[in-house]
């Protein structure tokens, strides 16, 4: 067991080596030098940001023979002893496995004794949020007024799980996620020290994947270094991650923007033939579109995204071309896809269907007359089976026509008129009462979401209660595949436009729907 | 000045201690227990001889001690020193619905006039009713000290004092920034200030950068800033804040519920402001400092925006709970959507 993992070899030994946490280092160093150390510290921060390392450095520094000092010397017996874990007075406790009250009681007992080997007793309690509530309470009193010569360092990734009473007794220091640059600089140094070569793109990718945690970055780097024996390229990193290059998503999105369906399907084919897993691919796609959304909303703020500058601006360009509404639409398609793709035997087919939807062929094609449907399925078959063929088709004429034919505004009304008699017939089977009511009404309009029915008398209009609406909506779904909202209006009365958006009581309706409630009394107190 | 009104009793006590004035009876009331504890500590330092603080000071809880028993204790002579300090925490004698025997009241009042006593009793009664006859009489002699939660101006004044104590300097705008980040809990503010002092070292002036580097934002303050950013249409800032919150391990649903709460408060605040409500903090039972910030936000946002926000929040919660969307992404989408509403309007 002579080999040590990279992140252990590269654990910082002095405050100066602590990457990306200058504020913590400076606070602790000043405290050491001025003798203003708090009796208890709480180190909070995401994993791999240097909490335990900082705690160990602090333990060395307070006990270093050159104290007061800004850095541990790492040479005196005390420093060396603490480093090797030989000093009895510096205890590192894993609170995840010693979480009970008994362990804490024992710890409390021991704090009373003076340190044996070094100047100051240091208790490093890692993962402190795992302590039980009783254990926390047992710790409280000791933490409030620990005996002199005792220093507590609590470290946790989840400070919100600690009781407020614990937090208020400690000096809290927050560790931040490392920036992309900081990680890359560190990785570059590691790579050159171990005498290997690594392309800049590969390093960036490793750093992005680590999302601000240096330990994750070093672990991944180690994997990649052992995967290949030559210089590390971006490809190698992607292979180790089992991921697809971001270029694929960029191209896919470009294809959506340019309405180039065949290009999109070809890209899918590439992914499939490269043996990538579609579930992971979907997750990556979601991350990509999420980045597009954030980049557009935050106006190209690379730091928020945590990705390289160059990509941040490429994303921003693309996001601007796509628009926020479109990004949101594609994201919701991808979300539905993600739920299905994991359990599906044919994930590629699902993806292809999702791509169709991204291109604008959505649920309404089922309502469309047989002709465009046939065209659509024919295209689908062709593209799935022989991806080359559609490439030869004249793009400009083919796709836009298709889109137009199935777009809801264009043909919904016309179809609905054809559908109406069948709807009446089916409703009659379902409920005679509803059918009778419906006979006195007339078909209004249908915009893909809301079906409007006009009545000549107020009486009938009022009679259309929820149960009838539900029945109609159900039958409608059976016939057309869409479950619409049903609205009734008195004939001659102006119908509110865009009724979905403008309904003042929409919230109330949805509350009633969600909680299965009932409106008992309506009154406006104002 | 407002500062005087709110910190009046703290300064009065300090002045009395400096001039060596002592009283047999003190009544500390108000909800700000940090100020109260500090006052107790300085009183203890003043009254008790060095080294005898442990033996001459007794702390009893008012919950399980009657006023008579307390007065009996007062009459007992201290074992070693001349002075004796009795602290009664959570004293219920001065609150609503607590009936005292006439004799006991008389006894307390006569004791309070006794100038030759060595003992001194401090009642800590957070919910004192000032209309009680006994309290009125104590107030007349100056034995009642108020420690109420500080409003913005007084809070700033208090902070300036603390900064000066630590031999640092800071401008008002910098202190405001500090308050925005560290919240308004005095205990937390004091400990954050200690940390800041250590961080600065020899540097005298507190600057913005050091505050941004060192101070820890509470989740509540973060949510507040998040809503602020959303209200003013700074989506980029809002996204960064959201990321911070989630990185620190806050569960997305909790963040969502805090955002919901903030918007609900905002709506309620608007409504109440419209009806001419004066004391918003009491009406909504929130901290006065938070109430002042809320008013500023409420002035910036119109009803339509709040309604739209509520609809978005509802949809977001439903989406998460029905498993339609991954929670972190849902929150991000929500923040973007909330921001968009604003930019498209303003």
Image (spheres, coloured by chain):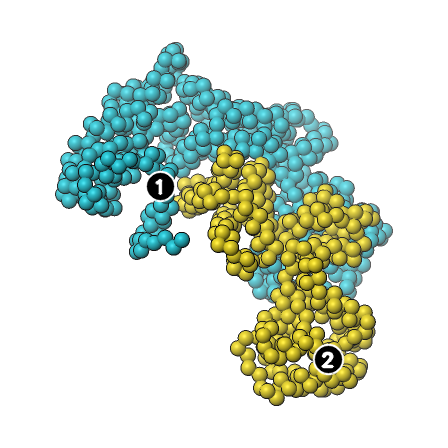
Chain colours: A cyan, B yellow
Provide the residue designation for mark 2. Answer: B24
B106 or A299, which is in the foreground?
B106
Q: Position of residue A429 (x, y in %)?
A: 14, 40
For the N terminus of chain A, the image quarter is top right
Residue A229 occupies which quadrant of the picture? top right
Residue at x 73%, y 59% (from the top left corner): A39
Q: Secondary structure at mark 1?
A: loop
At 66% from the left and 46% from the top, the residue drawn is A175
Report the front residue among A175 and A440: A440
Which residue sits at x=79%, y=75%? B21
Return the residue at label 1. Answer: A503
In this view, A62 is above or below A384? below
Where is residue B333 drawn, in percent x and y? 49, 38
Report crowding for label 1: few under 14, some 14 to 19, many 20 or more residues within 10 A (C-alpha): few
Residue drawn 64% across and 49% down? B180
Residue B221 tag number: none
């Amino acid at each position: 067991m002579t080999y040590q993992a990279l992140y252990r070899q590269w654990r910082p030994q002095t405050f100066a080596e602590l990457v990306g946490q200058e504020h913590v280092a400076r606070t602790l160093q000043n405290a050491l030098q001025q003798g203003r150390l708090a009796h208890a510290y709480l180190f909070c921060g995401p994993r791999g940001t240097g909490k335990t390392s900082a705690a160990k450095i602090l333990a060395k520094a307070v006990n270093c023979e050159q104290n007061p000092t800004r850095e541990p010397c790492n040479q005196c017996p005390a420093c060396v002893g603490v480093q090797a874990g030989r000093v009895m007075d510096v205890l590192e406790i894993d609170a995840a496995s010693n979480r009970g009250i008994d362990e804490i009681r024992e710890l409390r007992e021991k704090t009373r004794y003076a340190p044996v080997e070094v100047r100051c007793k240091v208790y490093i309690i890692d993962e402190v949020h795992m302590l039980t509530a009783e254990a926390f309470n047992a710790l409280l009193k000791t933490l409030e007024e620990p005996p002199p010569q005792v220093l507590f360092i609590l470290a946790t990734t989840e400070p919100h799980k600690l009781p407020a009473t614990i937090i208020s007794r400690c000096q809290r220091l927050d560790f931040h996620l490392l920036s992309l640059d900081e990680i890359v600089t560190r990785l570059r140094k590691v790579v050159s020290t171990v005498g290997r070569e690594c392309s800049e793109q590969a390093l960036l990718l490793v750093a992005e994947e680590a999302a601000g945690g240096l330990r994750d970055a070093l672990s991944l780097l180690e994997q990649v270094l052992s995967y290949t024996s030559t210089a590390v390229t971006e490809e190698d990193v992607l292979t180790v991650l089992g991921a697809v290059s971001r270029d694929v998503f960029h191209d896919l999105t470009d294809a959506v923007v340019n309405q180039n369906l065949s290009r999109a399907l070809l890209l899918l084919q590439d992914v499939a033939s490269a043996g990538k897993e579609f579930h992971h691919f979907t997750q990556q796609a979601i991350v990509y579109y999420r980045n597009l959304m954030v980049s557009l909303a935050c106006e190209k703020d690379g730091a928020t995204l945590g990705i390289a500058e160059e990509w941040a601006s490429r994303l921003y360009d693309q996001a601007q071309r796509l628009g926020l509404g479109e990004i949101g639409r594609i994201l919701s398609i991808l979300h539905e896809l993600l739920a299905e793709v994991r359990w599906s035997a044919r994930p590629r087919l699902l993806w292809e269907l999702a791509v169709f939807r991204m291109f604008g062929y959505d649920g309404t094609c089922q309502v469309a007359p047989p002709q465009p449907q046939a065209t659509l399925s024919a295209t689908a078959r062709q593209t799935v089976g022989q991806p080359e063929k559609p490439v030869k088709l004249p793009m400009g004429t083919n796709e836009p026509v298709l889109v137009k034919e199935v777009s809801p505004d264009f043909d919904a009304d016309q179809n609905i008129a054809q559908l109406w008699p069948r709807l009446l017939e089916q409703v009659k089977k379902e409920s005679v009462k509803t059918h009778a009511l419906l006979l006195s009404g007339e078909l209004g309009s249908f915009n893909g979401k809301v079906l409007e029915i006009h009545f000549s008398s107020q009486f009938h209009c009022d009679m259309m209660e929820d149960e009838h609406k539900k029945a109609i909506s159900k039958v409608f779904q059976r016939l057309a595949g869409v479950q619409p909202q049903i609205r009734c209006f008195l004939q001659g009365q102006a119908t509110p436009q865009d009724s979905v958006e403008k309904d003042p009581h929409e919230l109330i309706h949805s509350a009633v729907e969600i909680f299965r409630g009932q409106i008992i009394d309506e009154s406006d107190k104002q | 000045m407002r500062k005087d009104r709110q910190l009046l009793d703290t300064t009065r006590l300090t002045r009395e201690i400096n001039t060596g004035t002592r009283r047999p009876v003190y009544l500390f009331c108000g909800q700000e227990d940090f100020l109260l504890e500090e006052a107790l500590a300085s009183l203890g330092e003043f009254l008790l001889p060095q080294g005898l603080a442990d033996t001459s000071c007794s702390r009893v809880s008012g919950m399980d001690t009657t006023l008579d028993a307390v007065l009996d204790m007062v009459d007992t002579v201290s074992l070693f020193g001349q002075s004796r300090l009795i602290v009664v925490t959570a004293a219920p004698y001065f609150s609503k619905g607590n009936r005292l025997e006439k004799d006991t009241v008389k006894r307390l009042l006569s004791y309070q006039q006794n100038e030759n006593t060595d003992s001194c009793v401090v009642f800590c009664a957070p919910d004192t009713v000032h209309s009680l006859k006994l309290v009125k009489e104590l107030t007349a002699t100056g034995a009642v000290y108020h420690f109420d939660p500080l409003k913005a101006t007084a809070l700033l004044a208090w902070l300036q004092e603390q900064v000066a104590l630590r031999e640092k300097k800071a401008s008002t705008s910098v202190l405001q920034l500090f308050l925005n980040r560290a919240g308004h809990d005095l205990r937390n503010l004091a400990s954050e200030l200690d940390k800041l002092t250590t961080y600065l070292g020899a540097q005298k002036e507190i600057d913005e950068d050091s505050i941004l580097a060192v101070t820890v934002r509470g989740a509540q303050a973060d949510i507040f800033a998040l809503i602020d950013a959303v209200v003013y249409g700074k989506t980029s800032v809002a996204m960064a804040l959201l990321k911070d919150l989630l990185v620190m391990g806050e569960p997305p649903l909790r963040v969502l519920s805090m955002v919901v709460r903030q918007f609900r408060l905002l709506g309620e605040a608007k409504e109440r402001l419209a009806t001419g409500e004066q004391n918003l903090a009491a009406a909504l039972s929130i901290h006065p400092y938070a109430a002042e910030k809320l008013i500023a936000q409420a002035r910036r946002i119109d009803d339509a925006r709040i309604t739209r926000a509520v609809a978005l929040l509802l949809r977001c919660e439903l989406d998460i709970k029905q498993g339609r969307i991954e929670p972190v992404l849902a929150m991000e989408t929500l923040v973007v959507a909330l921001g968009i509403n604003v930019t498209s309007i303003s």
